Amino acid sequence: MLNGAGPAPEYRTELRLRTWKGMSDGAHRSGRYTLQPSGYKAFIPRPLPPDPPLALDAPMQVLLSEADMALGRLDAATELLPNPDLFVAM
């Protein structure tokens, strides 16, 4: 959240519904999971560009900016750890 303000709750709900729609059958907007003969699931991505196109409106840009900042903080924190691989394994 930038300056303590984030996207409106109704936008978060809409985003969550768009994200989870159709996931029960293993199909996602970005691709699908396929059961492999070995028993593992493999993610098969859909071709680009996505259809319908991504909606990069102002609330989505705020969320992307927040995610980018969080990744930057995480990257900075790993510089302070003596052994980041051991920390991740915990």
Image (cartoon, grey):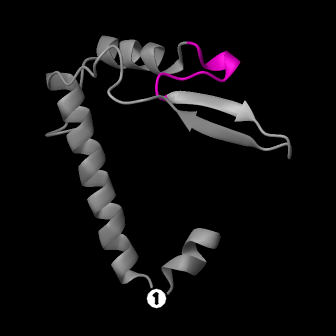
Dividing the picture into quadrants, the one containing residue 10 is top left
In the displayed structure, 89 sits above or below 46; it is below
In the displayed structure, 35 sits above or below 16; it is below
Specify the principal SS of the magenta part: loop
Dividing the picture into quadrants, the one containing residue 11 is top left
Q: Position of residue 64 (x, y in %)?
A: 25, 38
Q: Would you say 37 lies left or right of 72 here?
A: right
Q: Would you say 32 lies left or right of 63 here?
A: right
Indicate whether residue 24 is drawn in magenta.
yes
Magenta residues?
Answer: 22-30
Taking depth in this image into account, of 27 and 85 the one nearest to the observer is 27
Specify few, some or many for label 1: CA neighbours under 10 Å numbering under 14, 14-19, or 20 or more.
Answer: few
Taking depth in this image into account, of 17 and 40 the one nearest to the observer is 40
Residue lying at 36% horizontally and 30% vertically, measured from the top left? 48
Q: How many marks?
A: 1
Residue lying at 33% horizontally and 13% vertically, measured from the top left? 52
Q: Would you say 45 lies left or right of 43 here?
A: left
In the displayed structure, 70 sits above or below 57; it is below
* Residue 21 visible in the picture: yes
Indicate whether residue 17 is drawn in magenta.
no
In the displayed structure, 88 sits above or below 9; it is below
* Residue 6 visible in the picture: no
Q: Position of residue 40 (x, y in %)?
A: 79, 44
Residue lying at 54% horizontally and 23% vertically, measured from the top left? 28
Q: Position of residue 25 (x, y in %)?
A: 69, 17
Image quadrant holding the N terminus, namely: top left
Residue linked to disc 1: 82
- What amino acid type should be assigned to the residue bearing mark 1? Pro
Taking depth in this image into account, of 23 and 2 the one nearest to the observer is 23
